[in-house]
Amino acid sequence: MQTNLENLFYIGSFVGTIIFIGSFYGTTKKKLSEIELDMKEIKSDRIDIIDKLARIETKLDYLNKQK
């Protein structure tokens, strides 16, 4: 038969595990959100670069046609 002290130990271990898992989940979720924001910024930057390259290409095509 288990004593009250053993039961308290098991309950404390269980609660500690739940707290650890919760903090790990929260930290991971926060990091993933930060990564997601960074990726959106990178995507936006890439789109801007592609737009600028397209404008340059259009200007070059226009200049080549003028020759």
Image (cartoon, rainbow, N blue to C red):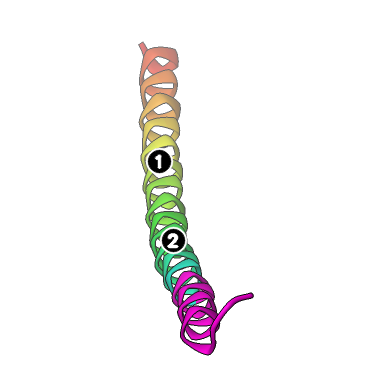
Q: Amino acid at mark 2?
A: Thr
- 3D distance between C-alphas at marks 2 and 1: 27 Å
Q: Helix or strand or loop: what does disc 2 sit on?
A: helix
Most extreme residue toward the right, as rendered?
1
12 or 38: which is nearer to us?
Answer: 12
User: Which residues fall within the magenta stretch?
Assistant: 1-18
Given residues 18 and 64, the one toward you in this image is 18
Please tell me in which quadrant of the rendered image residue 1 appears. Answer: bottom right
Residue 12 location (% of width, % of height): 46, 81
Task: Please give the name of the residue rendered at 35% of the width and 31% of the height, measured from the top-left corner.
Answer: 56
Q: Main secondary structure of the magenta part?
A: helix
The residue at 45%/79% (across/down) is 9
Q: Secondary structure at mark 1?
A: helix
27 lies above or below 67: below
Is residue 28 one of those drawn in magenta? no
Disc number for residue 28: 2
How would you rate the neighbour count of disc 1 (Cα within 10 Å): few for under 14, some for 14-19, many for 20 or more?
few
The x and y percentages for residue 2 are 59, 77
Does the magenta segment cover residue 4? yes
Which residue in the protein does label 1 denote?
Answer: 46
> Whole-percent x and y of residue 52?
37, 39
Q: Which mark is residue 32?
A: none
